[in-house]
Amino acid sequence: MIYLLDTHTWIWWNMNPQKLSLKVKELIGNSSSYAEILLSAISPWEFCKLLEKKRVGISCDPEDWIKIALDMPKLRLIPLSPVLSYRSTVLPQPFHNDPADQIIVATAREENATILTKDEKILAYENVRSLW
């Protein structure tokens, strides 16, 4: 199985794993339970925007934090390609207008991955697999 981490899931795994559901925490913690874990390139950007807006704080250099947070077993960072950019804008409706969520959902659809997310809008979206 292939899983894609929503941005908050990636951040919580690296900062506050107690915020994750037991199912997601056990899944991420056991690398033999998945083929790959994916992360959209938009997620490090979202993390940096949270830092910029002071909605999250860290006690180390942000570039060091990102480098360490990307060092997960079987993690593959998915770049934002022109095709993926386009596909994020033509998702089957209804879906909400958050561009980062659109990119994450389009990435999961493109990679045939299940999104690990607490986001109710993504969990309710019928055109992508999700789990919490």
Image: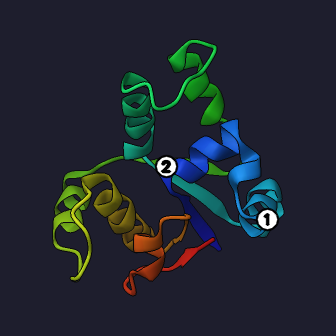
Q: Is residue 41 visible?
A: no
Kind of residue indicated by mark 1:
Leu
Residue linked to disc 2: 7
Query: Residue sitting at 39 percent across and 73 percent down?
Result: 109
SS for dot 1: helix
Tell me how far mark 1 sits from mark 2, CA to CA: 18 Å
92 relative to 4 in the view: left or right: left
Position of the N terminus by quadrant: bottom right
Rendered image quadrant of residue 69: top right
Residue 60 located left or right of residue 83: right
The amino acid beneath tag 2 is: Thr
Q: Residues within 10 Å of mark 2 (few under 14, many from 20)?
A: many
- At horizontal 55% and vertical 28% (from top left) the residue drawn is 66
Disc 1 marks which residue? 22
Q: Nearer the viewer, mark 1 or mark 2?
A: 1
Query: Are there few (<14), some (14-19), or many (20+) residues within 10 Å of tag 1?
Result: few
